[in-house]
Image (cartoon, rainbow, N blue to C red):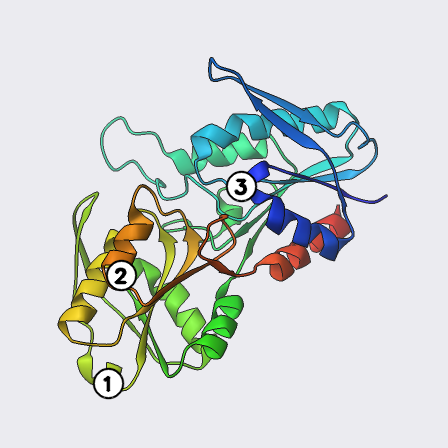
Amino acid sequence: MTPVLLSFPDDLSLATAVAGRIGARMGRLEWRHFPDGESLIAVDEEVAGADVVLFASLDNPDRKALPLRFAARTAREFGARKVGLVAPYLAYLRQDARFHAGENISANAFAEFLDQSVDWLVTVDPHLHRIPALGDVFRMPATAVASAPRLASWIRSEVARPMLIGPDSESAQWVADVAHEAGAPYEVLRKTRRGDREVQVSLPDIARLRGCTPVLVDDIVSTGRTLIAALEQLHRLQLPPAVCVAIHAIFAGDAWRALQRAGAGRIVSTDSIAHSSNAISLAEPIATAVAAHLASS
């Protein structure tokens, strides 16, 4: 039976591209907001016996999580055979330990919430620290799609003589993968965080950067302070304006404009989160992962 894809409004463009690649029918998903803050979800009723794929990138997760749970439950009520979730950006993974007294471990709690809601999960480059793999926190089958080949392809075609720079140690794993795929050199800076919005990074190796175009690669750009600190260091060295490449473009508050003011030559991102900076499509690798789950379910 033809799979049915139900997309949340923000993700409609990427979801439609994925649906075309896996031969799924785009179904109806409506999300109403009442003045008191409650949500009302309505989904396509013609899903009996079908595999349903919910598509919702989980930036702003407190707003989206409960409507997602409602959509999954309602699809089951109408007879969906299985319900999977494509969440290109997956929230709540960074709090994977209790750092201060009384804190919840949100990575475990949110994974349990999703395990109770859907049958399988596809995401892109999840922000894992002390969790080795998604299977260590989720009970359901979960696939982490790697964006490195897509980022590398864009860099090869759009940037002359790229020198990739990871703005902090957390970015090292992504920068190394992208650099390997792109056949380009890379360097990782050291970061000192002095607060949620105050960051200092080390100076890059100026000798390695001569004659190259700096390409700052980061997995998640939220406040943008880490990239801004790196841009300021590059500016002090009188290097060419850097290209900023982000996997997940959250851009909270004025982060987008702040990066522009800091001297970024170009800012691009994947379409894991809908944003005007989207230039790198993830439709193909996401579709491949979804097709594999549908084939095994």
Instruction: Estimate the x, y position of residue 52 in percent, counting from the top left.
Output: 73, 38
Rendered view: 153 above or below 196? below
* Residue 293: image location, x then y, percent: 70, 50
Q: Is residue 150 visible?
A: yes
Q: CA distance from mark 1 to mark 2?
A: 21 Å
Circle number at residue 210: 1
Q: Nearer the viewer, residue 120 or 203?
A: 203
Q: Which residue is mark 3?
A: 138
The type of residue carrying mark 2 is Asp
Image-based side of 193 in relation to 36, left or right: left
The dot on residue 168 is: 2
Tell me which numbered mark, 3 or 1, is placed earlier along the sequence.
3
Q: Quadrant of the N terminus?
A: top right
SS of the residue under disc 1: loop
Residue at (27, 71) in percent of width and height: 241
Q: CA distance from mark 3 to mark 2?
A: 27 Å
* Residue at 40 percent of width and 47 percent of height: 250
